[in-house]
Image: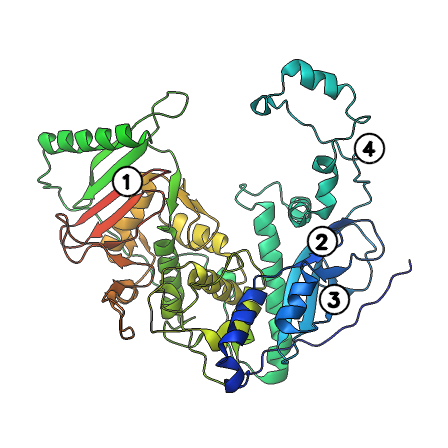
Amino acid sequence: MACVAVIAIGFIFPRALSQETANTSAFEANVKAFLEEEIEFDRYLFPPGQFPLAHWRNAERIEQLMGPLRLTVEYYDRSFRRVDCAESEGRYGAVVRGTTAGGFPIIRYATLYCTKADLDDYSPNVPIAMQPLPSFGISVAQWNAYQQNLRRFSFGSLLRSPKFDPDAAIFLAGLAELDPATNGSMTPRMMDRLWWTKFKAGDSATYLRTNGSRTGPTIDPATASSATARFGTVLWEAAAVTSPFTNDDAESLRAVSHKWTSRSNEPMVVCIFHRGAVVFHESFGTHAEGKPVPLETPMWMASITKLLTGVLVMQFVDRGLVELDAPIDRYLPELASARPCPLTIRRLLNHTAGLSWAGEWASDWEASMENRIAHAMPFLQTGTQFRYHRGGYALTSKLLERISGETVPQLFQRMIFEPLEMRSAFADNTYGGLYCSALDLARLGQTLLQHGRYGAQTIITDSALAAMLPIPLTLGAGERARSWGVGTSALGGNGLSVSTFGHEAASGAIFRIDPVNDLVVVVARNRP
């Protein structure tokens, strides 16, 4: 099979930009605008043989911002072997590299899928079945008339577009590799994320062998397979419940909850733990079809996910795998430069990293995030301003995945959800993807009230819990005083003690943990 070989270049890490360049506001604006630009391929689903070509989506804009930036592409098969052409069907990974006029290396990643199937809209190889479209004003009779001539009258890009869609390659590659025996928690998108996590770990190893290790201790995922492996078994039994809550109190809670649901027309589930026991657990409102909302309904916990991430990070701290105040280039060597790295895990998680300007690429799902942050490093206002943003959590996900060799969703499942019996819980990112029932979230809150213990499990130590709680931040002049922790914020007041912590949520969900009053309050809902 004749294929065109591509130029290979080495694994490059960023060199420091000159101080004069870094201080130029116009150059800073250009770099930040450049980081929003994306690379595209001619197609993402392609036949065996020559690989698709890569290009900037807005090539003229790139040249305006950064000058000429030539691209080279390396291709890897499913087993991470470098190849020059696609000889078999299945997943391929494309690594796109370039160097700016100022000498900064650019790295982007893309998933491609090789298939012999013909993907135009006349092909019988693509059995796409469309449902009637009544919401668009198309009657059933009209749709049936069209269905009889589906292949004669083209449906256009709705059938042709998969080969030009990067998500189609991710979907097919992940689906083709999916183990039917799994419990269904590994989606095609997560399979793709895991593949790139493993790829980048190997890519980093090449650099580390050549330049000396800059990372902290690595972990075989098996060594943390049990949440009690590091700490042993700690038994806990609830003390005799002497809660002051009365039937009248419960009626007051019901009245408030009914008022909230009637005003918002949004159902919710309320769960309150007091002194280790459930004192209130009821649902309010109905689904769209008019049925009452079951107590066990998983609901969107939105940014409460950040508190979950804080717990996961502290588990790594407990195991000696990371330090909250160590520069993160110790764990992500792509961020190494001639100057000290200002970013630490603590700053990433207390929103003082200076990443609030970052766009959609600041995501757990963006495989090239480390390279983009490295490019922006000279311009970060780190440690001086509090600016709430998901970017610090997304970069933390890359660090945790690099150390463990697993995706964050897998780590959540194995290190938190399973030990705490949070059977309804699932989270696919570090900053806003948690769905679970009110009772399951309350279990996490109760665990933190019990100094990291839940039944026979100990998920974090007392010292780790103390380190994740909100503390006053030291910020620059003109910034208002505030307290924040590792995924936690101070939420006292309105009858709760000043020690109360938790996290807010865009969904309107409530999560309050009051250690003074031995109280956990959860309100689960999907909209504010």
Is residue 331 in sight in this rendering? no
Name which residue type carries label 2.
Leu
Name which residue type carries label 3.
Glu
Q: Which residue is mark 1?
A: 523
Task: State how far apart marks 1 and 3 are (Cα).
Answer: 49 Å
Dot 2: element: strand
Say whether disc 4 or disc 2 marks the residue closer to the N-terminus. 2
Name which residue type carries label 1.
Val
Give the crowd class for mark 2: few <14, some 14-19, many >=20 residues within 10 Å.
Answer: many
Q: Are marks 3 and 2 in contact (CB under 8 Å)?
A: no
Residue 46 spot, x, y in % from top left: 79, 49
Say whether disc 3 or disc 2 marks the residue closer to the N-terminus. 3
Q: Which residue is mark 3?
A: 74
Q: Residue at x 29, y 63 (%)?
A: 485
Give the crowd class for mark 1: few <14, some 14-19, many >=20 residues within 10 Å.
Answer: many
Q: Which residue is mark 2?
A: 112
Task: State how far apart marks 1 and 4 are (Cα).
Answer: 51 Å
Of circles 3 and 4, the one toward us is 4
Left or right: 170 with respect to 492?
right
Residue 169 spot, x, y in % from top left: 69, 48
Q: Residue at x 22, y 67 (%)?
A: 481
Is residue 197 in sight in this rendering? yes
